[in-house]
Image (cartoon, rainbow, N blue to C red):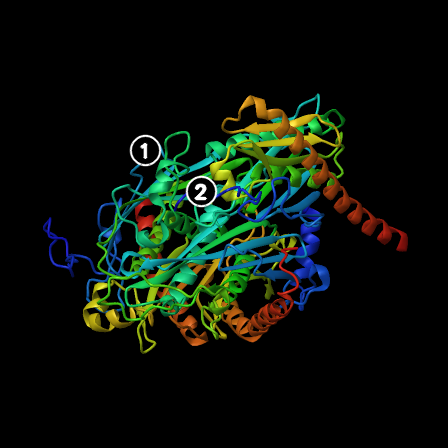
Amino acid sequence: MILSPAERAYLYESLVQKPAIRPGARSDHQFRPLEAKTGFLPNSNGSARIRLNDGSECIISVKSKVVVTRGESSLIEVDIDVPGFRDDSNFVSNLKFSLTNLLITKFPVEYLRLTSKYSFKLFIDCIVISHSSYPLSLISLTSYLALKTTRLPLLTSEVNDEEIEEQPTFSDDWDNAKYIHPTFQPPIFITLGVIGENLLFDPSIEEEQVLENGLILSFYKDKVITPIINMNLATNSNNSNFKGLNQKLIIQSINLCNKYCPAIIKALDTLIEQDDENDDTDNHIF
Amino acid sequence: MSRMELYSPEGLRIDGRRWNELRRFESRINTHPNSCDGSSYVEQGNTKVICMVQGPMEPSSRSQADSAGATIEVNLSVASFSTFERKKRSKSEKRMVEMKATLERTFQQSVMCHLYPRTLISIDIHVLAQDGGLLASMANAVTLALIDAGVAMYDYVSCISVGLHDQTPLLDLNGLEEQDISTLTIGVIGKTEKLALLMLEDKMPLDHLESTLGIAIAATHRIRDLMDDEVRKHGNLRSSKLAKN
Amino acid sequence: MDRRRLLGPLNTVIPNIGISSEINGSKSTPQTGISSSSSSNKNDIENFFLKTGIIENANGSAYLEVGNNVIEVSVFGPRPIRGSFIDRASFSVECKFLPYISQPGDELFNTNNQFNNSNSNTNANGRTGLTTIEHKISSYVETALLPSIILEKYPKSTFDVFVTIVATETPTYNSNEKLMRLTNWIVNCASVALVDANVEVKDIVTSGIVKSNKSGDIIIDPRGQIEDEQNEQDEQDDQNEENVLGVASFMNLNNDQLVGIWVEGGDIDQDLVTKVINGCNDMSKKIRANINSFLIDSLQ
């Protein structure tokens, strides 16, 4: 929803308070409530869907393919589709760059190695069905769920095939399929809004319109990692409050993420566990 | 691979159905209450389609405003993971453009467009998985989403695909059958025998057309009932909530 | 090493004949600035060549050479917009590599190029769209420059900044480093172009780049080759993963306000980020001093 100048001024004033008064009575480190579902696409190795309470929704499928390791520049390919935006638009390209960059640099590729010659290549396809606020953290949380629940078929042929001219063979039984790695936690992105001295986690569309700046941090293995970038989260550059930020806030944002993000990861993991329990009875997406 | 036996002498198809049996049909409406005006989800066998309707609303460009009635716009997106082999699809693919145009034409006539002059009804369709009968599932999903959006329609548009194997019509083809048999997709208005949609991408002998259409129309009536059940179920759920308040 | 042409020695020293101050851009021809730092100290900034007003039909333009990077920026605006009223100008940056240049990280991000070129990437005018990497640079530059421009002064108008990368360094080192180094200099060049276009700005945005080595020390303005020579062996083992790279852009206003930050690479903590930001700030200050004197000079 586009706010009027009066609404903007009101919202700005309440958000710069210490502590910030956020719409929806959220505290500044609180995410919006979300509902999620995993493993609903039988044709994919992993799938997940997250929906936020404002109607934003993202569906991700992870498909795998056996490739010759030497012939590939990377074992992960990310594609993002946002209806209403062209695939080569700045908006989609930047989302794609961020997610690809994070996964390529941080994903432990050795988990995908099959034999000395062959590997799995993962194709991560994201569809942002609808979105209001900047969807990067939504996409990355969904990709967390999808990658975490991705199951790859069990290799039955020899691991060392240096001398053998054979392609790898797999177990026919899908029950033998394995998760990428039992303790693997994919990296995620966290969006933070900067307003006055406050840092707001997961800003909503209304908040984005009055923010002074936006920060995107990545989080992996219980700590903040690179990339760290700043950007204007409101898609139209006509955000009149947009300005530079105080250097101290960067440090503060890292501390805040280190403090609160483990809870997010834990929540997502619990979600997967619960989904696993219901799995036999309910394979529907909705 | 050698030619599969699509229809065994005992009268069974590859997935074990008989010639006149439909696949599992499941639908939900109002699946996305917060992001659009009307939404639905349809599963026909392994084909899965999400549909979302926005509108009637003011069109963003003046060229879309028709003073005689609403303009219906369909946006089709087929996920690259929807088939077994992943394949990136472009929106300008000929088959997609044709399906989009077919759906637009069908619903332009089935919606009471004259009630909404100068407005736009925008329909977004996401195909998550496809296994035959794509156009039929999409049209069924659009019907349900339009009902959920409260857009006035003359009646349900229910769709089904039907193929002709030798002399036997086969109902609701799956992906494997669709590759080898010529397929006809029809959309019927309500419980009548009026066709709102008919699409045949290859050829079909004229002398068998009537029997094929006959069984297909009967099937669409069944689909209509299944969709009606879902709509009523959802309606009851909503009205029960109203009564409490 | 490019063997096709005669490049001269890598650490070229430009003789500072007759120039006493640190900032020597001012004494050369009015349109030309050459940065200081002739000594080969590690933390000095590479010499750069800057020239403005090279494109006649643009409102402002700047040309920058640093190392083997050649960047050209033209600014169009304020231009009137069509359609509805807006009370502040809109601002956009478009960054393009000349077609024959290999883009850093090409193989990772532009994998479906063939597909794009034949279909969606070419629009009706026959112009090809930007690649993912070009989009990334464009949005960093846009984010960094946006806070500096006084957009309120220009209702109903638009500013368009077009960046052309004419040449880049030979890809002897890490593609991320090449990309970020390029981005860093594009920001510097674009701010000068904005001034040349007489756009009202709050301050000039300048930017710096640093790299950390394994011991957590910061190298200001890394030039790839220095590092590569030292630990060529190590790099093959861990592919530079330990090194943190950071680009940050600043305005002098409000205690060196940070307008753009982009940190990539290995693990980080509070201390390292502080060091990265401070390092970038130091470098951006040196560049700012150069650009300032260059601008003052070109006025005279």
Vertical order, A236 against C271 (above or below): above
Left or right of C94 in this view: A259: right
Residue B213, percent across and down? 63, 28
Between A265 and B85, the one nearer to me in the picture: B85
* Amino acid type, mark 2: Val
Report whether residue A213 is seen: yes
Q: Residues within 10 Å of mark 1 (few under 14, many from 20)?
A: few
Residue identified by numbered label 1: C56
Quadrant of the rendered structure where residue A12 is? bottom right
The secondary element bearing badge 1 is classed as loop
Q: Residues within 10 Å of mark 2 (few under 14, many from 20)?
A: many
Provide the chain ID for the residue under circle 1: C
Vertical order, A277 against A68 (above or below): below
What residue lies at 57% left-to-right and 34% top-to-bottom?
A: B168
Mark 1–mark 2 Cα distance, whole angstroms, equals: 16 Å
What residue lies at 31% left-to-right and 57% top-to-bottom?
A: A73
Left or right of C216 in this view: B5: right
Residue A115, percent across and down? 31, 67
Between C73 and C26, the one nearer to me in the picture: C73
Quarter of the image for the C terminus of chain C: give it. top left
Vertical order, A172 against C154 (above or below): below
Vertical order, C72 against A55 (above or below): above
Residue C285, percent across and down? 36, 61
Q: Which mark is residue A12?
A: none
Residue A46, percent across and down? 51, 60
Left or right of A54 in this view: B91: left
Report whether residue A247 is seen: no
Left or right of C148 in this view: A10: right
Residue identified by numbered label 2: C199
